[in-house]
Amino acid sequence: MSPAPKDAQKPYVAYQGVAGAYSEAAAAKACPNFETIPCDQFETAFESVENRIADLAILPIENSLGGSIHRNYDLLLRHNLHIIGEVLLPVHHCLMALPGVRLESVRRVISHPQALAQCEQTLTKLGLNAACEAFDDTAGAAEQISLYNLQDTAAIASARAAKIYKLEILANGIQDDSRNFTRFVVLSRDPVDPQADRPSKTSVVFALENGTSALFKAVSAFEARKINLSKIESRPHKSCPIRLVETVKRFEYVFFAEFEASMAEVRTQEAMAELKEYSSFFRVLGCYPMDIASESASNEG
């Protein structure tokens, strides 16, 4: 699916997936007064903002159990959008099937690969004699069962997806670990003004002038100013993937870093000035309020 033309009087937020997806729940939490635009691909959500079909986009960036979503890190670098917020959403998985289908008659379970992995132990404890098959997304798996009247198939998705696609929940809260959260970022064409008087986070991306050997110096720029570096992630430097040092070929990387400080603070400005000294490429992806109330988020995900 592609984004539909929008009503110019309403603000819109784009997300990847179909109705009932966890991304839709994150959009509702981050942008409660916005209409949502479902997109078939992550990149479509980026493009919908760039092309002014949507005002904002919300994309998952990492999961507390599954780790980083590398595709979206690459898209952050490829597109020129700004991070203006974040949302932490608890992931509450349900096993669902068509009305009247009993647990023992399920022969196939479909869902996103991460959801299948996150529920593997619980599915075994339920005693299911079923094959697990990967699907593009959780809510899409629920929609598939409803559309094609799949009597022998169950999906792993949110409770909201079960309601939308008129499925019955066979088992609730089947995630193996309750500490399962996904972090989403909110993207805009324009940055927000950094504030020094509220808990903030800043995301940057950079490549080092002298390769990975200078990484210690880059990290020291934060440590010297008591800035909490909460995450650093490396991705292949696609415009310069190999560096030849004498006779040795070395892989080159760009680094995505997140730290708990605002660009309005002097210490942050000093740290960024030092980091630029070591960098061949540097870009601020966004300075935005931290999500500090995530644990009260709804389980409807």
Image (cartoon, grey):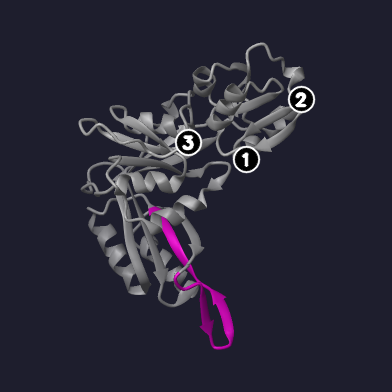
In the depicted structure, whether residue 221 falls above or below residue 22: below
Point out the image quarter for the N terminus. top left
Residue 299's disc is none
What is the distance, in whole Å, between disc 3 and disc 2 at their CAs? Answer: 27 Å
In the depicted structure, whether residue 227 falls above or below residue 180: below
Q: Which residue is mark 1?
A: 113
Of tags 3 and 1, the one toward the viewer is 3
> Looking at numbered disc 2 in the image, what kind of residue is underneath it?
Leu
Residue 128's disc is 2
Q: Could you tell me residue 42's position as x and y percent?
A: 45, 45
Residue visible at 76% across and 19% down in the picture:
105
Q: Residues within 10 Å of mark 1 (few under 14, many from 20)?
A: some
Q: Residues within 10 Å of mark 2 (few under 14, many from 20)?
A: some
> Looking at numbered disc 1 in the image, what kind of residue is underneath it?
Pro
Q: Residue 253: within the magenta?
A: yes
Mark 3 or 2 closer to N-term? 3
In the depicted structure, whether residue 43 falls above or below residue 109: below
In the depicted structure, whether residue 212 falls above or below residue 24: below
Q: State the SS at label 3.
A: loop
Q: Could you tell me residue 120's position as x and y percent?
A: 69, 34
Q: Which residue is mark 3?
A: 17
* Res. 248 image quadrant: bottom right
273 or 256: which is nearer to us? 256
Mark 1 or 2 closer to N-term? 1
Residue range of the region highlighted in magenta in the rendering: 239-258
Residue visible at 53% across and 84% down in the picture:
245
Type of secondary structure dominating the magenta stretch = strand
164 or 76: which is nearer to us? 164
Residue visible at 35% across and 31% down in the picture:
36
